[in-house]
Amino acid sequence: MLKKPIFITNFKTYEQATGVNAVELAKVHEKVATKTGKSIGIVVTSTDLYRVSQAVNIPVFAQHVDPIDYGSFTGHVLPQNVKNAGAIGTLLNHSERRLDLEILENTIACAQKSSLVRIVCAEDPDEVAAFTAFDPDFLAFEPPELIGSRDKSVSSESPDSIRDSVNRAKGIPVLVGAGINSAEDIRVAMELGARGFLVASGVVKADDPEKALTELVMAM
């Protein structure tokens, strides 16, 4: 079981967080986790899963899997392969990789079959409520218009939506993302019931990722 609150950095496909850089950034996250005692995970590309999971002992997640089993599925991301490569779970339905509702339901089921922790992204409280029917392990609330913002966050612009999402999640832990860049963003979301955070550029593209990560996780 993952310790909560948990702070998860999505490496996306940023140059600073792929290939050899992914391994180095993963080690930074492990160092901060050890130093602070905080629960920290990372989300990496499928091609980096094995090398990263071999290099660190913190939770590693895939960025996506497909709703398939072993068979003739060239070019797809097989959940079992992700698991065997060292991932403990997967992100699903991120705003940059949205899925139709039926496909999402099937993908969640396939990920569960492979014993992957399932983090399902939702764009608003209505989606949070709807996705509870699929019984994910976490719901990640991220208003798409705030993702990547450096001066606005869901905590500063729409705190009521965090409270609403938490209330409608039916006990499923809610991660908060979208513009989370400061300790104050973390503090506000935690007071409103967030059980963790999903960030990307605020850490990956920081001038000093270790410093940025430490400041954020220490606010949890």
Image (tube, rainbow, N blue to C red):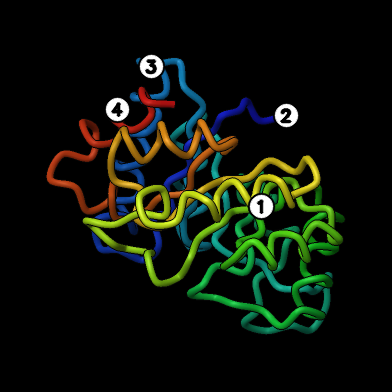
Q: Which mark is residue 1?
A: 2
Q: Residues within 10 Å of mark 1 (few under 14, many from 20)?
A: many
Marks 2/3: CA–CA distance:
19 Å
Q: Observer-nearest residue: 14 or 179?
A: 179
* Residue 54 appears in view: no
Q: Observer-nearest residue: 96 or 157?
A: 157
Marks 1/4: CA–CA distance:
24 Å
Q: Position of residue 75 (x, y in %)?
A: 62, 82
Q: Position of residue 137 (x, y in %)?
A: 74, 46
Q: Observer-nearest residue: 126 or 123?
A: 126
Q: Is tag 3's residue or tag 1's residue first in the polypeptide sequence? A: 3
State left or right for residue 145 relative to residue 70.
Answer: left
Q: Secondary structure at mark 1?
A: strand
Q: Secondary structure at mark 4?
A: helix
Q: Which mark is residue 214?
A: 4
Q: Residues within 10 Å of mark 2 (few under 14, many from 20)?
A: few
Q: Position of residue 9 (x, y in %)?
A: 42, 46
Q: Is tag 2's residue or tag 3's residue first in the polypeptide sequence? A: 2
Residue matched to label 3: 36
State left or right for residue 46 relative to residue 213.
Answer: right
Q: Position of residue 74 (x, y in %)?
A: 67, 84
Query: Hey, what amino acid is under mark 1?
Result: Leu
Residue 66, quarter of the rendered image: bottom right
Q: Is tag 4's residue or tag 2's residue first in the polypeptide sequence? A: 2
Q: Secondary structure at mark 2?
A: loop
Q: Residues within 10 Å of mark 4 (few under 14, many from 20)?
A: many
